[in-house]
Amino acid sequence: MKIKAIRTSLLFAGILVLFTGCNSVFQDFTPERIPENPSGIYTFSFTGNIPKGNRIEGSERAEITINGKSYPMTRSSADDLTFTYDYKMPPGITEARYYYTLSWDYQGANSVKEAARYSTQETGKVYHARLINRYPIQLVNDRGPAGSRIPIVGSGFSSQDVVMVGGVEAATTIHSANSLEFTVPALPAGKAYQVTLRTGGGDLVAGNFKVDEATLRVQPQSLSIASGDTDFLIIELDNPAPLGGLYVDAQTDIPASLIIPEINIPEGSRSVNVNITGGEPGNGILVLTVPGFGAVDVQVSVF
């Protein structure tokens, strides 16, 4: 009997290590600030992460407890443990305090048993979501090149609000409480980036914006420089350089023949003059690249 008791204790301790050793069982997808909608129905969701071990797959079930009342959740994917629940917010209620319960069956030594995990075991507190009536409604345009100005219409905008594109701060102009615009920063073209409005009360998602390739113009398109002499290039943009300016990367296959300073197009400027000094004689190419812009090749001859 003593040996059996020891084995039982070890098994129980192993189960505790298995379930308490998980760094993150619950990944909550419900934002802390939820824009109000006319229907008053709001989706709460999470993904669970529990080891397979002797868990019986397909037995997993979830429940959400909101403001003291519990509701069964629906599994939205057979491939992972993602559960959702559409909650009808009662009239006059603008906040929800909630937590999740994830249960499953597992094969014990002699029978099938049940295990459960609560999100409060991880966080030490319940989650909190609040309805807001201040949020961006939409991006007027969902694509454009770096430097273009994109309006957002919504409600409750303030002078402290700043637009972020892919995590990069964009120059933001507030026109009114219902209208603002931002300048697309220099990001790699051909990709879509999340646009968020950073406010004093948190970040609000405005949508996704695809950065198209912008045009970088260079004059002249070829240079012929005597060794020791200096000539110049003019680099031009269609739109003013965004917040922080633009760094132009200059690379050449004849580095001993060209002396090139660091090139930056100042914030708000549309062009910059760049002095190029001839070094050792040689013929090659100077390649100018900027994130979000097509690369430009300049033929160079140093004699």
Image: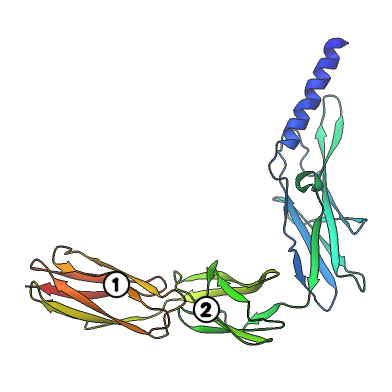
Mark 2 / mark 1, whichever is N-terminal? 2
Which element carries disc 1, helix, strand or loop? Answer: strand
Camera-side residue of 227 and 10: 227
| Mark 2 → mark 1, Cα distance in angstroms | 24 Å
Q: Residue at x 16, y 79 (%)?
A: 231
At x 76% / y 45%, what residue is drawn?
Answer: 122
Q: For this view, does 143 lie left or right of residue 105?
A: left
Q: Residue at x 83, y 11 (%)?
A: 3
Residue 140 x %, y %: 60, 85
Report if residue 236 is visible in the image. no
Q: Residues within 10 Å of mark 1 (few under 14, many from 20)?
A: many
Residue 195 in view here? yes
Residue at the disc numbered 1:
288
Q: Is residue 205 above or below residue 126?
A: below
In the depicted view, which residue is nearer to us: 256 or 117? 256
Q: Amino acid at mark 1?
A: Leu
Task: Please tell me which residue is depicted at 71% across the width and 38% down the height of the picture.
Answer: 52
Of the 4 image quadrants, the one containing the N terminus is top right
Locate residue 103: give its quadrant: top right
Q: Position of residue 81 (x, y in %)?
A: 74, 50
Near mark 2 (Cα within 10 A), the count class, few <14, some 14-19 or many ≥20, is: many
Quadrant where the C terminus sits is bottom left
Residue with the mark numbered 2: 171
